[in-house]
């Protein structure tokens, strides 16, 4: 895993926690912030996934 995959997954989890906390306390603002963080995290993880595919393809091409 690369750093974008790890950071993205962590942001996604943090966003889920923040969303859940917002639901518990009845804060739509916190729920929304949690959802936004989840989207950011998934986007960053997808970027990391793409980087890994490119890196692996480049390694295979050199062989």
Image (spheres, rainbow, N blue to C red):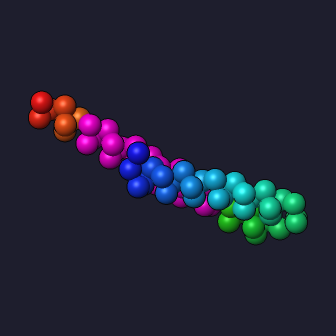
- In the picture provided, is 51 more to the left or to the right than 8? left
- In the picture provided, is 31 more to the left or to the right than 10? right
| Viewer-nearest residue: 9 or 43 | 9
Q: Which residues are magenta?
A: 36-56
| Viewer-nearest residue: 61 or 32 | 61
Residue 61 screen position, x and y as percent? 14, 32
Quadrant where the C terminus sits is top left
Residue at the spot 25% in from the left edge and 42% down from the top edge: 55
**Residue 15 falls in which quadrant of the image?**
bottom right
Q: Quick check: 48 above or below 59?
A: below
Confirm whether residue 35 shows in the render.
Answer: no
Residue 34 screen position, x and y as percent? 68, 61
Residue at the spot 33% in from the left edge and 43% down from the top edge: 52
Residue 13 screen position, x and y as percent? 64, 53
Residue 44 screen position, x and y as percent? 46, 54
- In the picture provided, is 18 more to the left or to the right than 49? right
Quadrant where the N terminus sits is top left
Majority secondary structure in the magenta region: helix
- In the picture provided, is 62 more to the left or to the right than 21? left
Number of numbered callouts drawn: 0
* Residue 31 highlighted magenta (yes or no): no
| Viewer-nearest residue: 38 or 3 | 3
Confirm whether residue 13 shows in the render.
Answer: yes
Residue at the spot 27% in from the left edge and 41% down from the top edge: 54
* Residue 39 highlighted magenta (yes or no): yes
């Amino acid at each position: 895993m690369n750093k974008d995959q790890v950071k993205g997954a962590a942001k996604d989890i943090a966003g889920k926690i923040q969303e859940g906390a917002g639901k518990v306390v009845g804060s739509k603002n916190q729920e929304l912030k949690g959802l936004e963080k989840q989207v950011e995290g998934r986007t960053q993880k997808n970027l990391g996934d793409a980087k890994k595919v490119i890196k692996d393809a480049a390694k295979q091409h050199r062989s």
